[in-house]
Amino acid sequence: MSDILANLDDPKYSLLQGGLADPQSFTSIGQLTLRSYQVKVFRAIVRSVINQLGLSFVVMFPRQSGKNELQAQIEAFLLMHYFRRGAEMIKISPTWKPQSQNAMNRLERVLNRHPLLNQFWTCEQGNRFRSGAALQTFLSGSPEANIVGATASTLLQVDEAQDIRIDKYDKEIAPMAASTNATRVFWGTAWTADTLLARELQLAREAQDRDTIRRAFVLTADAVAAEVPAYGAFVRQQIERLGRTHPMVRTQFFSEMLESGGGLFTAARLALIAGTHPSELRPRPGLPYALLLDVAGEDAAAGQNTLENPQRDYTALTVVAVDGSQPAPWGGHWTVYRVVARKAWHGIAHTQLYSELLAQARHWGAQRLVVDASGVGAGICSFLERALPGRVTPFVFTSASKSRLGWDFLALIDSGRYREHSDATPEQDIFYEEARACRYSTGSGVERHLHWSVPSGLRRSADGSLLHDDWLVSAALCAVLEGHSWGGSITRIIRAPDPLLEMDGRWLRIPD
């Protein structure tokens, strides 16, 4: 590149002038057309870097709307711009593998394909990209990563900032930009109000209110869909499958922050599950049924073999009718689960409990039993598996599995596919009381753990007895039924995909 700068007759010189003059020209030379919302962010960040304004930006894009490609283009542009003058730029990701590695792969692809840069860059030490005197370094922001001492004199980027611990940023990452007050960019998607991303968004909005310089770029799926109709069609399908109020839809597509805790089953959710069908005493011909069993005893908490609610002592059985004939909003059919009966046992010997459960399975002609196989439930589950081969699905409660169960249960509720019967029974009253009492919190980090339970020590309003979560957990096991095949009159089950996996780069990409 030094030869090009020294030789005005070199045909690449005019290209270089254009590329250095404007970010949009730079990407066009690289045969990429940015969307308008990407251009605004690109120009704002580059302006702050080149003019040494030291601004702090927050960029929140919906999943798969071009955030990562935009990052790579900005990095490549600044490597070219500072080829002779030199620059130190650092990008922090929550994990080294795969996030930092993916970010490096994207930058490498852009550098190799850009005519002004493909011959003028090298990779050093596996994580340092150099173009002349300009250097872009990639580091992990995981809690155990030792990154103290790195310097970002030109630009500091924090990717997926909602997954970076605040204390990690304040103690080890923020000082990287201190000596020059370098521009800082926090990229991510919405999560809870107590994350690093949420804190920096609030600060950015306060700063731009004072001086009118835009620092917060918060985009929703609607804005992306205005430029990419296919994206809008995809998001509509996700809303139909998961519901507009599902936490993943709210955060990943509409950049809405979640409360960091509170009641999980809001009034709106309780209204969604209130069905109009009656309870049943016996199965209806031709309709598949499933039993959902929460066994009294051990429950996992925070990944340890301790009791989250040590006073829970009821074994709760929920019976659901499985209706796969309901029209899905996008065409075809999907499965609706209707609660038709409940039964509980208290202080019963497991040998007797096994006999009664087997009788219930035969009475309902249950095609599927989901059984809590945690702790003492493992024995009952094993007996049932031998008696009903191929029909029992064990579910072992751990912190991770209960989190996943909670997310999946919310997906059923928010999409209108889980319905309670309309009869006022004692069991039904307790279920609703447990649901109203259930509290949740969400973990930080990439795992997105959902912690949910009825707090210990609460008492029922009717008789003052202890309120547990037996019926609620039993009902939530309905989510485990997703993906199973069914006999009888049912047609087929359309499994709602994991939104995070589907959004992780498998359906829509920025054109190369």
Image (tube, grey):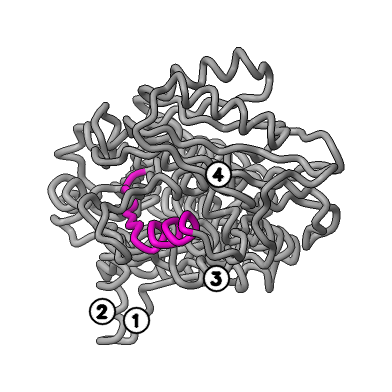
Mark 1–mark 2 Cα distance, whole angstroms, equals: 8 Å
Residue beneath label 1, please? 213
- N-terminal of the pair, mark 2 or mark 4, is 2
Q: Amino acid at mark 1?
A: Ile
Residue beneath label 3, please? 271
In magenta, the rendered stretch is 426-445
For the residues carrying marks 1 and 2, which lies nearer the camera in this image?
A: 2
Q: Residues within 10 Å of mark 2 (few under 14, many from 20)?
A: some
Q: Amino acid at mark 2?
A: Ala
Q: Using residue 335 as the reference point, say whether residue 490 is left or right of it.
A: right
Residue beneath the point at 39% across and 70% down? 47
Mark 3–mark 4 Cα distance, whole angstroms, equals: 19 Å
- Marks 2,4: beta carbons within 8 A: no
Residue beneath the point at 63% across and 66% down? 35
Q: Principal SS element in the magenta part? A: helix
Residue beneath label 2, please? 207
Say above or below: 251 vs 351: below
Closer-to-camera residue (447/221): 447
Closer-to-camera residue (423/469): 423
